[in-house]
Amino acid sequence: MNGSKAAVIDGKFEARPIARRRSLLRMIYDSNGFSFVPSMVGLLLLWEFSIRILHVPTYILPPPVDVAAALAAHWRMLLVETFATFREIMGGFAVATFTAIPLALLIVYSPTFERFFNPLIIVSQAVPKVAIAPLFLVWFGFGEVSKMLIASLIAFFPLLVSATVGLKGIDPEMLNLARSMGASPIRTFWKVRLPCALPNFFGGFKLAITFSVIGAVIGEFVGGDHGIGYLILLASGSQRLDLLFAGLVILSAVGLGLFYCVEFLERRFVSYRSTMSVVT
Amino acid sequence: MPNEVMHHIGVRDLSKTFETPMGSVEALSTVSFDIAVGEFVSIVGPSGCGKSTLLKIVAGLLPATTGSVTINGESVIKPFTDLGIVFQRDLLLESRTALDNVLLQVEMRGLNKDAYKERGSELLERMGLGGFIDKYPWQLSGGMRQRVSICRALIHDPPLMLMDEPFGALDALTREEIALDLARLCERTKKTVLFITHSISEAVFLSDRVFVMTARPARIAKEIAIELPRPRRSEQQEERLFARHTGEIRSLLFREEKRQERD
């Protein structure tokens, strides 16, 4: 049996959809091979040494070492603020998802709804959303709720557009096939329409999660007393640029992490041609 | 009454006019024919003449403007479901393996999926896809994908198959291979088949009768009974009878193409 071990492993490798069995780390490794690590280290070194050589004052640009020190010194406070912003981001993303997806379904399944409400939705997007943020503070208070709603307002539209495009983009012949199989519209939705639209849904989720981060920070800028956005505002006012950069580092890390989480889910639920096409 | 049972599909004075912003376009005009149980009928015609429209009307996927379609003596007014359809594009779901794509038919009909798994694998094996049952569509070639879609149309063992240029997107050799597989399968299972193609030799090779359509608006220009004995073999394509049939159809089609160009 030992002799055929290699063949068995080979066979398993062949039969198993590799894309589905990946861990998050493995996925990040596969997508860019951690090639950002050397370039990142290089950038940090360049930053550190050019500040020392050119004698840039730390209230203009702090060296990375100072930023790291700020992160280490204030980690407890930073963690609390990060969680506040994180809650706003996730809340905003959730609200956007639970409004955009049902609306996309209404638009796709009801031509009447589309005719009357689509122009309204598009017009609403012409209003600069950042300008609406102060209004939300008046309506929903200075707490996390108003930030969540600002985040969801910004994340909503790209998600709606992606989901609508995905659901509408189905091959009409595919729907004919479904009808000839005698399937109900609900079954057709779950078995055919949704799976076909899933890649677009995830495209929308990726945009929405990124936009939610932006929205939450905008909300904190406009008014409030919590979160990394608020911290950045305070730090800039008191010329604590080490703290400001610490905030930026945290926001980037949160944004990147969430983006990869969505991508991870995408690879679990969407069978990808692109993930394997390099191999075959 | 016995006469009616013999006819699987009856098409009477069928016409179809599409209303477009540029005015109305007559796609079909007074098409009538019968197809017997277990008969293999091909339809050939100039491109864009309305062959696909005819197939969709027969399947109940498109309403006729005038005329009627009956299947098993009952008129078709909504999508007819006791059939299997193969379209030109394979319409496989990228998220499903070959077997799961075949089983979509079963799931959509609300049948027990597990009960059909074995039959699904068997069908795929018989179609030469034994080693590809768990592969995803992007791991298959165009010919393999279309074979999967044929298996999907067969899994529930329908008495009727409608095929709309199923091999149109394939290369010549693959095409011939699948056609041979299909001929064997239909001879064994005695299915009624309505097959649309623009390959003349494919039509002659597979069919009991070939309908040659006119240019738009399409009517049946001529109906040709193919006298080649069954079971069909590849070598029959070298025979004189085969050449006579294809020759006749070709000259009819050329005439129609010319007429279409004049109009």
Image (tube, rainbow, N blue to C red):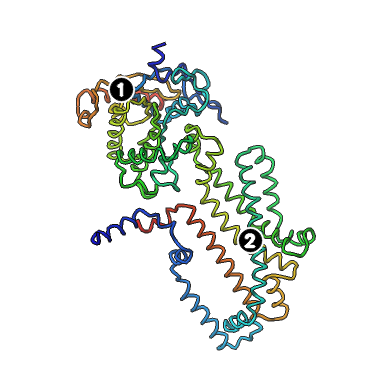
> Is residue B13 in view from this perspective?
yes
Residue A26, located in which quarter of the rendered image? Answer: bottom left
Q: Which mark is residue A90?
A: 2
How many residues crowd around disc 2 within 10 Å: few (fewer than 14), some, or many (20 or more)? some
Count all numbered tags in the image, as a single digit.
2
| Proximity of marks 2 and 1: CB atoms separated by less than 8 Å | no
Identify the residue under disc 1: B208
Which residue occupies the foreground of this view, B36 or B30?
A: B36
Location of residue B145 in the rendering, given as x and y in whole percent from the top left corner: 37, 43
Q: Amino acid at mark 1?
A: Asp
Location of residue B13 in the rendering, given as x and y in whole percent from the top left corner: 47, 16
- Quarter of the image with the N terminus of chain B is top left
Location of residue A5 in the rendering, given as x and y in whole percent from the top left corner: 27, 60
Residue A81 sits above or below residue B232 on the image: below
- Quarter of the image with the C terminus of chain B is top left
**Residue under the point 54% across and 55% down:** A203
Image position of A46 (left or right of A71) = left
Location of residue B245 in the rendering, given as x and y in whole percent from the top left corner: 26, 23
